[in-house]
Image (cartoon, rainbow, N blue to C red):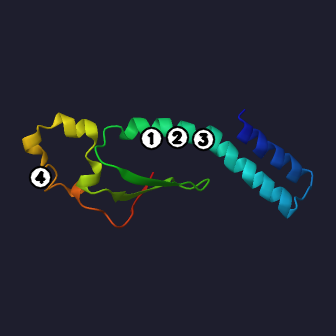
Amino acid sequence: MTNLEKLYQSLRSLYELGVSLNEDMQNQIERIEKELIKEDIIPRLTLSIDQAIQHLQCPVSIKINYIPKEPLNIEIGEIMSKKMHLSDNMHQSVPKEKRSGLFDNDMTASVLKSWSKISI
């Protein structure tokens, strides 16, 4: 059982016993919950996401919205302009004479201004 699961179990036990939490206690619990999410959930998400997007050749903003018992909502934000997303590795692998105009006709060269929503 993770510490986050222990926190939730403890809260369920308190509620079942009829214990009400004052605002200060609720704020402390929320702070602890955020810390535990950062320590436990974020590293696991990072590994999973990294494996899924490691082949992308442009920086992109991805926002994950999670609401319990609802489909996961993933929003894709801006894709950076071509000047910003040519990585050193990619830049070195393309001959110098072919570097200019590399992404001129590619959609990834433009900046997408609105978020695209994907629900899974």
Q: Residue at the spot x=69%, y=46% of the render?
A: 35
Mark 3 residue type: Ile
Residue 41 circle label? 3
The residues tagged by marks 1 and 4 sit, at their Cα atoms, a distance apart of 30 Å
Residue position marked by numbered label 1 in the rendering:
49
Residue position marked by numbered label 2 in the rendering:
45
Q: In this orientation, which residue lies closer to the viewer: 71 or 19?
A: 19
Mark 4 residue type: Gly
Left or right position of 10 against 119: right
Mark 1 residue type: Ile
Mark 2 residue type: Leu
| Among the two numbered marks 1 and 3 on one chain, the one whose residue lies closer to the N terminus | 3
Tally the numbered discs. Answer: 4
Q: Mark 1 against mark 4, which lies toward the viewer?
A: 4
| Residue 61 figure quarter | bottom left
The residues tagged by marks 2 and 4 sit, at their Cα atoms, a distance apart of 35 Å
Find the residue positioned furthest to the bottom: 114
Residue position marked by numbered label 4 in the rendering:
101
The location of residue 68, given as percent across then percent down, is: 62, 53
The location of residue 78, given as percent across then percent down, is: 35, 59
The residues tagged by marks 1 and 3 sit, at their Cα atoms, a distance apart of 12 Å
| Residue 5 figure quarter | top right
Q: Residue at the spot x=31%, y=43% of the render?
A: 56
Does the CB distance between marks 2 and 1 fall below 8 Å? yes
The residues tagged by marks 2 and 1 sit, at their Cα atoms, a distance apart of 6 Å
| Residue 1 figure quarter | top right
The residues tagged by marks 3 and 2 sit, at their Cα atoms, a distance apart of 6 Å
Q: Note whether 70 is above or below 5 in the view shown.
A: below
Find the residue positioned furthest to the front: 96
